[in-house]
Image (tube, rainbow, N blue to C red):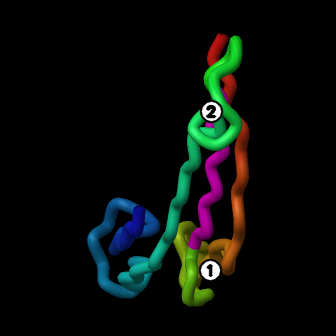
Amino acid sequence: GIGVASAHDGIDNTGLEERTIDAFATLDLAVGVELNDLLGPSAASTRLDVRLNNLLDQEYETWGYWYGGRYLIPAAGRNVLAGVHMQF
């Protein structure tokens, strides 16, 4: 599947514009394959999942703090997650 994530948030509860994190959007891609469909039936149901986050390598922040000024922590760039799920 393809997903788009977006957000706009404050770094404290004052509601002041200078104490907010800029809005952002990322494009993510996920693919899953049932290995039993490829390898035939077995005792366990096996699925391989791969997810590519931030496909366009967007620079953005998701967290920060105010201490006499705005300090923002950069979010992860493009990254890949993979997993194998087995059900017995």
Cα gap from disc 2 to disc 1, whole angstroms: 49 Å
Q: Quadrant of the N terminus?
A: bottom left
Residue at left offset 62%, top offset 80%: 71
Residue 52 counted in the magenta span: yes
Instruction: Name the residue beneath numbered marker 2.
Output: 36
Q: Residues within 10 Å of mark 2 (few under 14, many from 20)?
A: some
- Local crowd size for mark 1, using a 10 Å CA cut-off: few (<14), some (14–19), many (≥20): some
Residue appearing at x 64%, y 57% in the figure:
50
Q: Is residue 72 visible?
A: yes
| Principal secondary structure, stretch drawn in magenta | strand
Amino acid type shown at disc 1: Tyr
Residue 3 position within the rendered picture, expressed as x and y whole percent measured from the top left: 38, 67
Q: Name the element at disc 1.
A: strand
* Position of residue 21 measured from the top left corner of the image (x, y, whole percent): 44, 78
Name which residue type carries label 2: Asn
Closer to viewer: mark 2 or mark 1: 2
**Nearest the eye: 77 or 42:** 42
Name the residue tied to disc 1: 71
Left or right relative to 77: residue 17: left
Q: Is residue 66 visible?
A: no
Q: Position of residue 51 (x, y in %)?
A: 60, 60
Q: 36 and 9: which one is in front? A: 36
The span shown in magenta is 46-53
Residue farthest along the front direction in this orientation: 40
**Residue at 71% in and 44% down:** 83
Label whose residue precedes the other's in the sequence (2 or 1): 2
Which residue is depicted at the point 56% across and 67% down? 63
